Amino acid sequence: MATVTFKSATRIYPGSEKPAVDGLNLDIEDGEFLVLVGPSGCGKSTSLRMLAGLEEVDSGRIYIGDRDVTDVTPKDRDIAMVFQNYALYPHMTVAQNMGFALKIAGTDKEEIDRRVLEAAKILDLEEYLERKPKALSGGQRQRVAMGRAIVRQPQVFLMDEPLSNLDAKLRVQTRTQIASLQRRLGITTVYVTHDQTEALTMGDRIAVLKDGLLQQVGTPRDMYDSPANRFVAGFIGSPAMNIGSWTVNGNQATFGDAVTTLPDDVVAALRPEDDGKVIVGFRPENLERAAEGSDSQIPIKVTFVEELGSDAYIYGKIVGAEREAETFGSGDGSDQVVVRIPPNEVPKPDDIVRVALKNHGGHFFSHADGSTLTTR
């Protein structure tokens, strides 16, 4: 096992002036499960391929442990990669697929058999060792691909969206298996996904990228509770955070008929370049019914109610939102607000529900650059 370090690592593809990965600085601890997450084109797969040696590093350095691997060939980096397509040999059995890399490396047959059987026990594949890939389910094939990586006993696992080809139910099951397996093996793992739910449930830490730039690194709880900027706040969480621009009036912010009181530290942090605006964000669970006559309340006209048994979500629009030039809602560009409510308090469509932010339930960001204004 080993640490992984990116030091100002940059990759610019030929014909492009803008870096796909721009000055990435990232330290990954020995045995850590780190998830690289972000929207399509953010540079997460390029970062992984740079670590694997499949992409050149135009500037900066990459280290595995104390060893500079920036210019080392992929086969000499002591890493094992798992792709979203299983890349199994159809004419080989499961055992042959899992042990093929060791066979090519000239490993003794008894040692190959021992490692393959050991990995098969870990992955619950013992009864499938003599089957061909066509006789396996998608989840079983992915476990074989994992087994092929495990038998190599590398210093670092690299996983590039390994669950993308699985159906929704199997993805939930397999992501749990992968996270549990990594913790048992203790091998440093870098995992790439565009699915923020996978990132929140699997990683020891998450690194969020956008347009080739690292936005924030932290634990899943850090990302959820204390996003560094508007992008991270809107990207992490499901349903997405309700977020948008409100007008500042003294120590209050307004949007349509909605009014909320701003914390003192937020008011103090506002700058002239914010132009009298503040980005307000709150998650569906950060709201409660507003007290009668309260100065701070957000009236929402209900359009749809989603009942889930233990919880319920109401979807609607802030009353008076049509007077605003910008939208406010769950996710950028949406005008639909999502609020989680107790299942025994379900309103009807077209009802007006008045809610307010719970104590410390709001997130506030600079209108000028999207940086956080809160110190939660």
Image: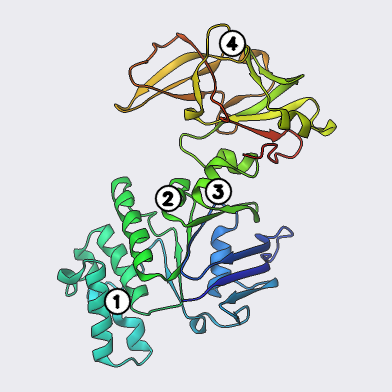
The residue where tag 4 is placed is 294
Mark nearer the N terminus (1 vs 4): 1
Question: Which residue is at the front of the view, 97 or 301?
Answer: 301
Mark nearer the N terminus (2 vs 1): 1
Query: How crowded is the residue under tag 3: few (<14 C-alpha within 10 Å), some, or many (20+)?
Result: some
Q: Residue at x 28, y 64 (%)?
A: 141
Amino acid type assigned to the residue bearing label 3 in the image: Pro
Mark nearer the N terminus (3 vs 2): 3
Query: How crowded is the residue under tag 2: few (<14 C-alpha within 10 Å), some, or many (20+)?
Result: many
Q: SS of the residue at dot 2? A: helix
The residue where tag 1 is placed is 98
Question: Which residue is at the front of the view, 13 or 313?
Answer: 313
Q: Residue at x 72, y 28 (%)?
A: 264
Disc 3 + disc 1, Cβ < 8 Å: no
Q: SS of the residue at dot 3? A: loop
Query: Above or below — where is 117 with respect to 37?
Result: below
Please name which of the two marks, 1 or 4, marks the residue nearer to the observer: 4
Amino acid type assigned to the residue bearing label 1 in the image: Met
The residue where tag 3 is placed is 39
Which residue of the protein is positioned furthest toward the top in this rendering?
293
